Image (spheres, grey):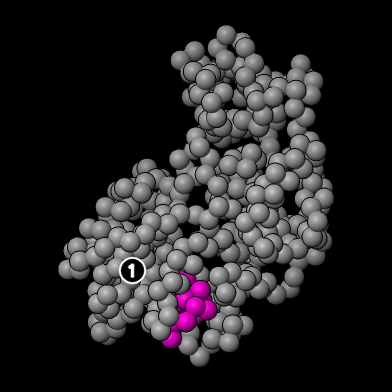
Amino acid sequence: MNTASLPVIRLMPKVRPQTFLHGVPWIYDNEIVTDRRTKNIAPGSLAILEDAERRPIALVAVNPMSRLFARILDLDLTAEINQGWLEQKIKRALALRETMYDQPYYRLIHAEADGLPGVVIDRFGDIVVVQANAAWIENLLPELTAALGQISGIKTIYKNASGRARGLEGLDDVSAVLAGKMPDAPVPVPMNGATYMADLSGGQKTGLFFDQRPNHAFAARFAKDARVLDMFSHVGGFSLAALANGATSALAVDGSDPALALARDGAQAMGKADQFETRKGDAFDVLTKLAEEGETFDLVICDPPAFAPSKKAMEAGLRAYERIARLAAPLVAEGGYLGLCSCSHAADLSKFRASSSRGIGRAGRVGQLIHTGYAGPDHPQHLQLAESGYLKALFYRL
């Protein structure tokens, strides 16, 4: 690449360049010398990052509209950021997934951890759903589409433009089919012996949460002959895995009618509709109501949305996690199991564990913490980004 033609951004004197040479992939606006020239760089443009002594460090993608001013793409200043470069990243990521999974249902690209900052790609057989959450990759969508088209078995490429991240980058919310033809019905996805129905264009995020796969499997170990309660069930993540592994009944609770309809379709596809029940409602209200009804379950799982999506929301979020644990624990039969999950990157594992354990204690229950789970290996953690280790799952025996 002709680096002489690229704009230059420079680190403030106080910022150590070793930070980025050692793997930190993000440069914030308060770490950059800003002037009219840097502020006028077009969002998504490539640039050279220099240290305060004007020594080149890396190729970066710049967005002056975002507080996250630049993302490191390559420490090789001669790298060509083009279709071939994207193909290399995708093939490397694919090799890992094909080693781990015998069917093509997984997260193919997990953003920075797979070397493509702000890019999330989930695979559903011959369909991939792309979340282009950074301006640089939005500018390279034709190249990304062509690179994905080189992967054997991929026929349809869909850009899902929903989500808060695109707004922070100044991007639109217009989804589009980039290649192929989208199905006109939900797609069946096999995992852990269960069948999930994924709405790839109208569901949450990319249509299904692959990150919980190992935690679904762990919970299913306790499912044989069990009555199961799956709170914040979405399309039936824990409850359908439990039914596939011998549960006698499962109740899925969520606030979304479409999600519950997909869960019922999944149970039907598995031949488990007679053992599956859904209830729409606010989780806190439903937990309270079930206690009033005297219900108990052998396995209770609570997998809420991020109660602490930012540091500002952390204290309120931790109180919400404690409350969930306090309301759920009384519903667990003696000797039964309680699974509590958090996808809040702002609340680290120790804080989440303390809130959950405190809630169990305040419910008057005594428990053993038997397992701590994380996102599956198709959601690798970036070594320098704590945010990439967002998912935690705690399993207790009460």
- Between 213 and 26, the one lying in front of the other is 213
At 27% from the left edge and 78% from the top edge, which residue is drawn? 333
- Which residue is the extreme one toward the bottom? 274
The quadrant in which the C terminus is found is bottom left
Residue 107 occupies which quadrant of the picture?
Answer: bottom right
Q: Is residue 33 magenta?
A: no
- Between 44 and 90, the one lying in front of the other is 90
In the rendered image, residue 263, in percent from the top left (x then y), is placed at 54, 77
At 69% from the left edge and 24% from the top edge, which residue is drawn? 76
Q: Secondary structure at mark 1?
A: strand
In the rendered image, residue 283, in percent from the top left (x then y), is placed at 37, 70
Q: Is residue 240 magenta?
A: yes
In the rendered image, residue 203, in percent from the top left (x then y), is placed at 60, 66
In the rendered image, residue 254, in percent from the top left (x then y), is placed at 45, 72
In the picture shown, does residue 161 fall above or below 241? above
- Which residue is the extreme one toward the top? 53
At 56% from the left edge and 23% from the top edge, which residue is drawn? 21
Q: Is residue 164 visible?
A: yes
In the picture shown, does residue 265 fall above or below 17? below
Q: Which residues are magenta?
A: 238-255
Q: How many marks?
A: 1
Is residue 326 shown left or right of residue 105? Answer: left
What amino acid is at disc 1?
A: Leu
Is residue 374 shown left or right of residue 296? Answer: right
Residue 81 occupies which quadrant of the picture?
Answer: top right
Q: Which residue is mark 1?
A: 338
Residues packed near mark 1 inside 10 Å, few (<14), some (14 to 19) or many (20 plus): many
- Between 353 and 245, the one lying in front of the other is 245
